Amino acid sequence: MPYDVRVINELVQKESAFAERLIGAVGRVVVGQKPMIERILIGLLTGGHVLLEGVPGLAKTLTVKTVADCFHLRFHRIQFTPDLLPADIVGTTIYRPQTQEFASKKGPIFANLVLADEINRAPAKVQSALLEAMQERQVTIGDETHRLPEPFLVMATQNPIEQEGTYALPEAQLDRFMLMIKVGYPTRVEERAIMDAMSLGAPPAVEPVADAEQLAAARSVINQIYIDDKIKDYIVNVVAATRDPGAFGLKDLADLIEFGASPRASIFLNVAARAHAFIKRRGYVTPEDIKAIGLDVLRHRVILTYEAEAEEVTSEDVVRRLFEHVEVP
């Protein structure tokens, strides 16, 4: 196995070079927010959908668009509004008088990278129109099913739920997002740099640094990254602790958790940890990779009780406590 790890390390060193260039290119446009940039890249490297949450003005849309510009991929942006219809996203059937036949008119969902901007501005019926596309990588228009292009990735942004005019995303759709990233405010130094840069006009353009072939090659290497059985057990234990915290010495959390994370969380945590190791240019996964990405994978999958809300306990508080108490291999 040590020999295999050395070989994988060499592959990672070779294939991960573009990831460092991409982070640098996006960083020249978006000041700060490096954790957000890295996690968006993890989504791209694994094919996992990404949800960004933060108040308006934190460069969520700019970051996603800049990342898309760094790839030779087809990109579509959909602005979600209260009057949006499902057909505006997936497409519809139209009648062609010339042929006297109905034909499918594909919507903007048919792209490699889809930016669902302010996804929680649209009602649940429209949000649910993305479910089939996100899970099955296909769309049904009328009685025809169409495959989506490969790669396909949804990057959604949303304002906090308590903001005016927003609708909470259904739990079934939240679970389809591999990562939910909370975007915070920049530091004073970063904000000064943002002010100076943006007051001069439009942000600088970025040149593409990778294409679909490089992305596919990187995904192939990530699938080979070594993860020890003890690390796999650690992942399963963390996810199991969200369902039965008492079994891990956290009986006080049992009354705060309504539903724990699904098996999809274990799958995503495994895959995301491999991608995190890839970005750090390692051919093997460590417990630190699990901890680094775990909050983003689990925060939207732990459903709390009314008691937790009354005590102002958040899902992030619960997940952090789980990581503090679950034994690390």
Image: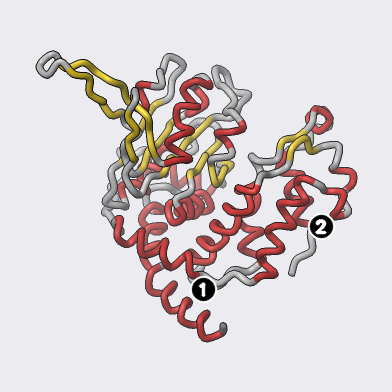
To which quarter of the image does residue 218 belong? bottom left
In the picture, the quarter occupied by the C terminus is bottom right
Residue named by callout 1: 283
Tag 1–tag 2 contact (CB < 8 Å): no
Residue 195 seen anywhere in this rendered image of the structure: no
Place of residue 12 in the rendered image (x, y in percent of width and height, measured from the top left): 44, 72
Place of residue 232 in the rendered image (x, y in percent of width and height, measured from the top left): 66, 64
Q: Of 7 and 314, which appears nearest the observer?
A: 7
Residue named by callout 2: 325
Residue at image point 61% right, 63% down: 289
To which quarter of the image does residue 64 belong? top left
Toward the bottom, the furthest residue is: 3
Place of residue 252 in the rendered image (x, y in percent of width and height, measured from the top left): 89, 43
Is 247 displayed left or right of 171 in the figure?
right
Q: Of 12 and 39, which appears nearest the observer?
A: 12
Is 90 displayed left or right of 268 in the figure?
left
Q: Secondary structure at mark 1?
A: loop
Position above or below: 122 against 303: above
In the picture, the quarter occupied by the N terminus is bottom right
Residue 229 seen anywhere in this rendered image of the structure: yes
The image's mark for residue 214 is none
Q: Mark 1 or mark 2: name the one nearer the start of the chain.
A: 1
Name the amino acid, label 1. Answer: Gly
Q: Secondary structure at mark 2?
A: helix
Position above or below: 323 against 299: below
Name the amino acid, label 2. Answer: His
